[in-house]
Image: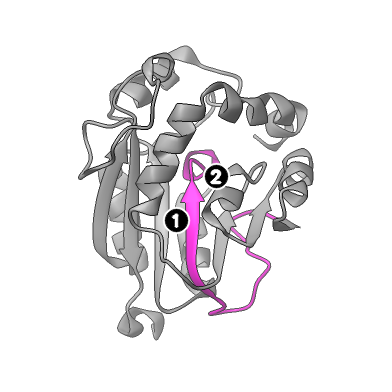
Amino acid sequence: MRNVFDKYYKKYDKWYDMNRSAFLTELAVIKKVLPKKGEGLEIGVGTGRFAQALGIRYGLDTSKGMLELAKKRGISVRLAAGEKLPFKDSVFNYAVIINTLCFTKNPMKVLWEAKRVLKKNAKLIVGIIDKNSFLGKLYKKKKSIFYRKANFLSAEETATLLKNVGFNRLSYYQGIFKTLDRIKSVEVPLKGFGRGGFAVISASLSRKEKLK
């Protein structure tokens, strides 16, 4: 997918302006579980829209074009894949992976790497387009230039992956309850998953699991 994002990174970035209420809704969902302090990392930072809005200093991606825009937004960027993070063990208080797992070659390996770079009692926040939701089905049917090769995950599948890697104390929030063209204002996030097209799973890394 790297070539697609490098070729169309400006088109991708414009989505956030064209669908501002949807973007702000996704931010609102993430903020329900985002730590108020600590050093954060965004895996799959893209053009830096989320990282900038959430106050995340560090980000990485496989697209040079996207990283150029993220850097202009004040993010300290690295050109790298989520399967091999260019950081030492136990350096971040939290990490976020937003609409990125569906594009990775090995989602499980990305989560293992996230675990490695997180400190004890850290938090991992994963945002996905839930494949079982109306939006997931719509995106799969639409076959956009960005999502036509995406391997969408459901909230249940994502939770299973997190648990298998050793994360626990999972919590769920959701947003995007209408098609994007019908979202005219920021939607209120709800607990759980199933109704919203955008699902966020927050998982903790206990001291015991970090020692494994």
Q: Is residue 44 visible?
A: no
What count of labels does the image hold?
2
Q: Is residue 210 above or below residue 28?
A: below
Q: Report the side of 113 relative to 85 (left or right).
A: left
Which amino acid, by three-letter code, is at mark 2?
Answer: Thr
Figure quadrant of residue 12 = top right
Q: Residues within 10 Å of mark 2 (few under 14, many from 20)?
A: some
Stretch of the chain drawn in magenta: 79-104
Q: Report the side of 138 relative to 163 (left or right).
A: right
Q: Residue at x 36, y 23 (%)?
A: 135
Figure quadrant of residue 141 = top left
Q: Residues within 10 Å of mark 1 (few under 14, many from 20)?
A: some
Instruction: State the image coordinates of residue 109 (x, y, percent, origin top left).
Output: 50, 59
Instruction: State the image coordinates of residue 142 (x, y, percent, origin top left).
Output: 47, 13
Badge 1 is on which residue? 108
Q: Residue at x 63, y 62 (%)?
A: 57
Badge 2 marks a residue whose secondary structure is loop
Q: Residue at x 64, y 34 (%)?
A: 1
Badge 2 is on which residue? 104
